[in-house]
Image (tube, rainbow, N blue to C red):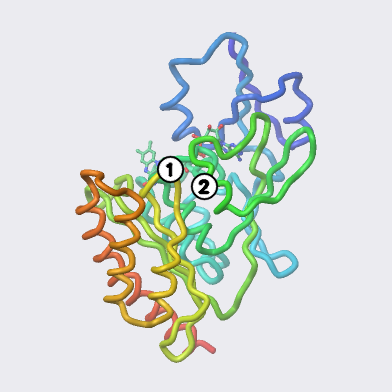
Amino acid sequence: MSILVRPSSLTELFSYEYDAPELIAGGTDWMIARRSNLTQDTLCADISCVNELKGIEIINGELRIGASETMTALHKSPLVRRYASALSDAAYVMGSEQIRARATVGGNVANGSPAADTPAALCALNAYAVIVSKNGARRAPVSELASSGKAPLAPGEVIKEFLIEIDQKSISAFMKIGSRRQVSISRVNMAACAVCSRGKFTQAKVFVGTLGAAARFSEEASEALCRGAHTELADALASFAARQIPGRPTLAYKQSALRALAMDIYAELLKRAEEAENNG
Ligand SMILES: Cc1cc2nc3c(=O)[nH]c(=O)nc-3n(C[C@H](O)[C@H](O)[C@H](O)COP(=O)(O)OP(=O)(O)OC[C@H]3O[C@@H](n4cnc5c(N)ncnc54)[C@H](O)[C@@H]3O)c2cc1C
């Protein structure tokens, strides 16, 4: 028989005599994947009440986001909006209002879907995940976790939080295109982060989702953004897609979607940079 527990701390979670309990955060992916195929003697741990997985705050110059914070909490947070706009954007456009109220950022990354929205944003923001287990803790760039695709964690590992270094000069944005305006899984998504001064981008990082197992860094798109022409950014993204998914039937669609996203994200980054400069 399956057992459901609801620990309130990591110490309690790691005290159960199971090496790797099934973790349930918001349950929006887990319910679909696991509700009908649980084997006997599964320990299911609802981690939504684990204290250490909560909170959005600034500590030692880093924005700390607890893994069980929901998309609604992320989007509503003034700290996330100010220091990690791309993540705020991604949280706002994911799923429906009901899904956003339950879906957590930890679950979105741990689930390892190629179409997930927050990994591209977290990668562009150079975010780190703090991962804990019975054996200790490790810190891994989200870009590394995301690149391992479907199984970003070892059994028994729990994402505790995400850390993003505060950079007052950086601006970022996330955009996606799905099959409809709302409650739509991304056909293409992308996130960009850069420093912008007087309309010129430097230190750009562009990550594109849905072109393979995970969000991927595009060096040519990042360089094109720094060269400062949105048409160059569009071309760079189209050729990046051609190299990532050569011959795939969806390539032409994705290229044209990326071209459109390039125009929009470029304009949004410029707008945000101008607002940031005006606000000092
Ligand atoms: C109708 C619908 C629409 C959706 N739309 C979108 C969308 O637009 N964009 C998008 O990206 N996703 C979408 N999703 C997918 C889903 O909502 C997200 O991936 C969500 O963020 C998962 O979070 P969760 O808390 O519900 O995870 P859960 O379902 O609880 O868990 C998912 C997986 O992650 C593991 N896990 C959860 N938390 C942790 C942790 N802290 N450490 C280690 N492992 C953990 C679980 O064990 C499980 O394997 C949608 C889902 C539905 C049902």
- Ligand 1 within 8 Å of disc 2? The answer is no
Q: Position of residue 183 (x, y in %)?
A: 30, 45
The part of the image, by quadrant, that contains residue 10 is top right
Q: For residue 14, which quarter of the picture?
A: top right
How packed is label 2: few (under 14 Cα within 10 Å), some, or many (20 or more)? some
Residue 115 at x, y percent in the picture: 38, 45
Name the residue located 43 percent from the left edge and 74 percent from the top edge: 223
Real-space Cα separation, disc 2 to disc 1, in angstroms: 7 Å
Quarter of the image for the N terminus: give it.
top right
Q: Nearer the viewer, residue 82 or 210?
A: 210
Residue type pointed to by label 2: Ser
- Against 93, is 205 above or below? below
- The residue pinned by badge 1 equals 213
- Within 10 angstroms of label 1, few (less than 14), some, or many (20 or more) residues? some
Residue position marked by numbered label 2 in the rendering: 147
Q: Quick check: 264 left or right of 45? A: left
Q: Secondary structure at mark 2?
A: helix
Quarter of the figure with the C terminus:
bottom right
